[in-house]
Image (spheres, grey):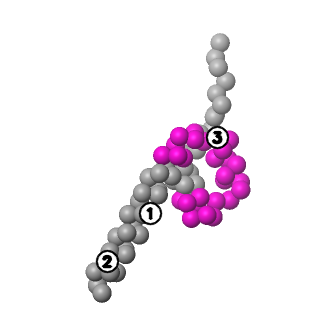
């Protein structure tokens, strides 16, 4: 007896990255958000969100450091 899978069509890596970036800057469409909640693994989006946040903060800190060092 096989168990029915909950997520038969898991989103690809590119779709996950696109969703994380769109959500991170606040332009995620309702259609994509619904797809992510229905088909995606929450742990994937949580880890991706944490990585995105760390990279975003590091980028902002680097840009601010460069601008202030030129002053």
Local secondary structure at mark 3: helix
Q: Do we see residue 62 in this rendering?
A: yes
Q: Which residue is mark 3?
A: 39
User: How far apart, in angstroms, are the residues tagged by discs 2 and 3?
Assistant: 41 Å
Q: Is residue 11 magenta?
A: no
Element type at mark 2: helix
Q: Based on the displayed image, in which of its 4 quarters is residue 64 positioned?
A: bottom left
How far apart, in angstroms, are the residues tagged by discs 1 and 3? Answer: 26 Å
> Between disc 2 and disc 3, whose residue precedes?
3
Front position in the image: 21 or 2: 21
Picture residue at 64% right of the left edge, 34% below the top: 8
Q: Using the image as rendered, state which of residue 62 and residue 2 is in the foreground.
A: 62
Predominant SS along the magenta part: helix
- Determine if residue 14 is in view: no
Q: Any mark on residue 56, and which?
A: 1
Q: Residue at x 38, y 63 (%)?
A: 58
Q: Secondary structure at mark 1?
A: helix
Q: Who comes first in sequence, dot 2 or dot 1?
A: 1
- Labelled pair 2, 1 in contact (Cβ < 8 Å): no
Query: Which residues make up the magenta segment?
Result: 21-47
């Amino acid at each position: 007896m096989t168990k029915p899978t909950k997520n038969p069509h898991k989103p690809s890596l590119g779709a996950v990255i696109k969703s994380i970036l769109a959500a991170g800057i606040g332009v995620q469409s309702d259609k994509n958000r619904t797809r992510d909640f229905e088909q995606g693994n929450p742990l994937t989006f949580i880890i991706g969100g944490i990585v995105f946040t760390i990279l975003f903060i590091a980028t902002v800190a680097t840009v601010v450091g460069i601008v202030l060092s030129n002053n």
